Image: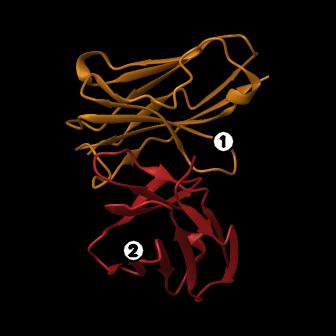
Amino acid sequence: EAGVAQSPRYKIIEKRQSVAFWCNPISGHATLYWYQQILGQGPKLLIQFQNNGVVDDSQLPKDRFSAERLKGVDSTLKIQPAKLEDSAVYLCASSSGHGPSYEQYFGPGTRLTVT
Amino acid sequence: SQQGEEDPQALSIQEGENATMNCSYKTSINNLQWYRQNSGRGLVHLILIRSNEREKHSGRLRVTLDTSKKSSSLLITASRAADTASYFCATGSGYSTLTFGKGTMLLVSP
C-alpha cells in the first residue's frame, strides 16, 4: 500500500513570508496528524484531524499556523508569517483509528528553513 | 511538554552487541509505543505495548513495561549498523494523542 505522501520535501523562505505544506494520508485512514520536529527533539503534535474535524489543536500557534483537511482526505498546513523559530521538519502522519492504541504511519517530512 | 524521557541521550556500540534504552514517563498511560527514525526511512513504528502487558517481542526487539515505576525499556539484540537511528518512546492514555520523548541516538559501528 502507498505510504503517507508529503510535499515539498524541502523549503527555504525568509522570515515574514508564508509557506504551505501538503499531505496525503494512507488511503482509508481517518485520522491525520501534523507534527513539528525541531532538531534534536521528538515530534511535537500541532494538530490532529478525525476525518475533516479537528480533534486536538491545543499546541498549534493559531496566530500564524493554520491547517485544514477538506473532504477528510488530504490536508494542508500553512504558516503565515514565518518566524526564524519555525525552522524544523514538519511531519504528517495518519492512522486507522483515533487514540494511542493505534500505530501512526509517518510521511518523509518537509524540512523548512527560515532565514 | 513531553511526557516520555529517554535515557541515555546517546549510545555508541559495536555491531553484534546489545543496545538497551529506557523511557520514563510521569502520568498513567494505556499504551506505550516505540518508534525509530533514520535519514533513510523516516519515522517508523516498532512496537506497541499495552499497560496490562509486561513484555513484548518483535524479532530482535524486546520491550518491557513497568507501570509501577512508570518506565519502559527497549532492547535490541545482536545490533547491526542498520540499527543506527534515533529511538523515541511515545505515550498516551484514553483517547489522547501520543506524546513523544526527545529520543535516544544509537550509533552502531561495524
Badge number at residue A65:
none
Q: Is residue A16 left or right of residue A9?
A: right
Q: Is the image coloured rainbow, by chain, by secondary structure, or in one colour?
A: by chain
Residue B61 figure quarter = bottom left
Residue lying at 24% horizontally and 17% vertically, measured from the top left: A71
Residue nearest the viewer, comparing A18 with B81: A18
Q: Quadrant of the C terminus of chain B?
A: bottom right
Name the quadrant containing residue B17. Answer: bottom right
Residue drawn at point x = 35 percent, y = 49 percent: A104
Helix, strand or loop at disc 1?
A: loop
Closer to the camera in the image, A21 or B56? B56
Q: Nearer the viewer, mark 1 or mark 2?
A: 2
Q: Indicate the position of residue A95 as horizontal and vertical percent values.
A: 29, 44
Label 1 sits on residue: A38
Q: Residues within 10 Å of mark 1 (few under 14, many from 20)?
A: some
Residue B110, visible in the rendered structure: no
Q: Nearer the viewer, residue A108 or A39?
A: A39
Residue B84: % across, % down:
61, 68
The chain letter of the red chain reads B
| Residue at 33% over, 54% down | B93
| Residue wearing tag 2 | B67
Q: Secondary structure at mark 2?
A: loop
From this view, report whether residue B28 is shown above or below residue A94: below
Counting from the top left corner in percent of width and height, residue B54 is at 33, 81
